[in-house]
Image (cartoon, rainbow, N blue to C red):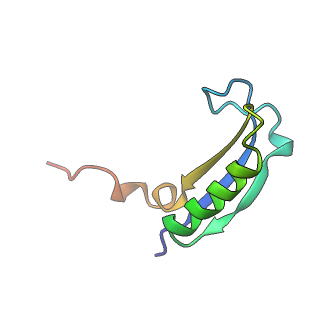
Amino acid sequence: MSKLHLVFGGRVTDPRTLEFEDLDSIEIVGVFPDFASAEKAWRAAAQRTVDDAEMKFVVVHLHRLLEPDLLAPPAA
């Protein structure tokens, strides 16, 4: 399976959190096949809004959500 990554962002209520003000206005930058391309897209989106402290973009590791058992420690 690919190591899929989602990049999205929007206006947050507090720049120190990930609480988005309006989920209807979330900007989906895209889904990427590897972290390097996701990071490149994240940097471009973040740079575009660098002067707005209330805008935040994030990278989500979709592959970790799709296969959470891979992250669990081995059973004893």
Most extreme residue toward the left is 76
Task: Indicate left or right for 31 with 75 as reference.
Answer: right
Q: Nearer the viewer, residue 29 or 49?
A: 49
Residue 42 in percent (x, y) is at 63, 56
Image spot of residue 51 (x, y percent): 76, 38
- The percent coordinates of residue 57 (x first, y second) are 67, 46
Question: Image check: 38 left or right of 71?
Answer: right
Please state if 61 lies on the left or on the right of 19 as rendered: left
Q: Which percent across, then down, holds residue 37?
A: 57, 69
- Snapshot quadrant of residue 28: bottom right
Residue located at (31% from left, 50% from top): 72
* Residue at the (59%, 63%) spot, across then down: 40
Q: Residue furthest right?
A: 24
Residue shown at 76%/45% (left/top)?
49
The residue positioned 69% from the left and 23% from the top of the image is 14
Counting the numbered discs, the total is 0
